Image (spheres, grey):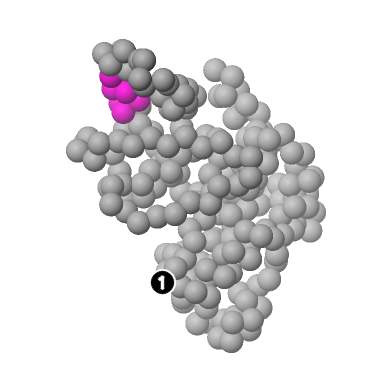
Amino acid sequence: MMTSNTAVWVPTETPHNIRISPGAKVCNLFIDPCIEGLPQQPVMLSISPLLRELITYLCHLDHQHSKIKETGRIIDVLIDQMVLMPTEQFDFPIPKEPRLHKIAESLLDDPSNRNTVGQWAIRFAMSERTLSRLVNQELGMSFARWRAQLHLILAFKKLSDGVPVQRISDDLGYESVSAFITFFKNKMGIPPKQYAKQQSSLNNL
């Protein structure tokens, strides 16, 4: 999952699939794999306002009637910017392992689900220790961090859409808005309202 300020970089010949939310707008760029400096593994990239505008411009460009020389210069700037973009650590990987895949789908369908690792383990007829180890083997992180990353991504999107913090807290299943604010601040270093204000300022540059 991603927000308007991020992009997914997928290297050539990497098997993948995408799930697009209803009403979402997506731009796809295909970049020569010979270009140096770009990540060798799939990652999420932060997208600056300039880079976002360059991507949007190229995706809507009439390539049949565009001038090759001018378009080439724009592409050069875009590549230079992409190489400079930091990678984001906030993603929600979907495991291939069947049981974990079902858990991921359940969390996506109902992010307010607060089932513990033990409860999920019972549902799939395994011990809590086995499930925890499986999550770590498949994803390289704990179950708590995995779910937290989903909540962060959803919070980013909702904040960018102007959804009130109280509503986001309810949608994600927190007992109180203060609990959600504490969670967000612990992960991002700032409260959600301040984060939304900063992102709005960046988007208006």
Q: Is residue 45 visible to the viewer in this orientation of the structure?
A: yes
- Secondary element at image label 1: helix
Residue 76 within the magenta-colored segment of the rendering = yes
- Above or below 49: residue 12: below
Residue 155 within the magenta-colored segment of the rendering = no
- In terms of image quadrants, where is residue 46? top left
The foreground one among 110 and 133 is 110
- Residues rendered magenta in the picture: 72-80
Name the amino acid, label 1: Gln
The foreground one among 59 and 85 is 59
**In x, y percent, where is residue 157?**
63, 41
At 31% from the left and 47% from the top, the residue drawn is 11
> In what quadrant of the picture does the C terminus appear?
top right
> In the image, 149: left or right of 116?
left
**In x, y percent, where is residue 23?**
64, 40
> In the image, 62: left or right of 127?
left
At 41% from the left and 20% from the top, the residue drawn is 62
At 40% from the left and 55% from the top, the residue drawn is 16
Q: Main secondary structure of the magenta part?
A: helix
> In the image, 32: left or right of 185?
left
Mark 1, residue position: 137
**In x, y percent, where is residue 52?**
47, 27
At 42% from the left and 37% from the top, the residue drawn is 28
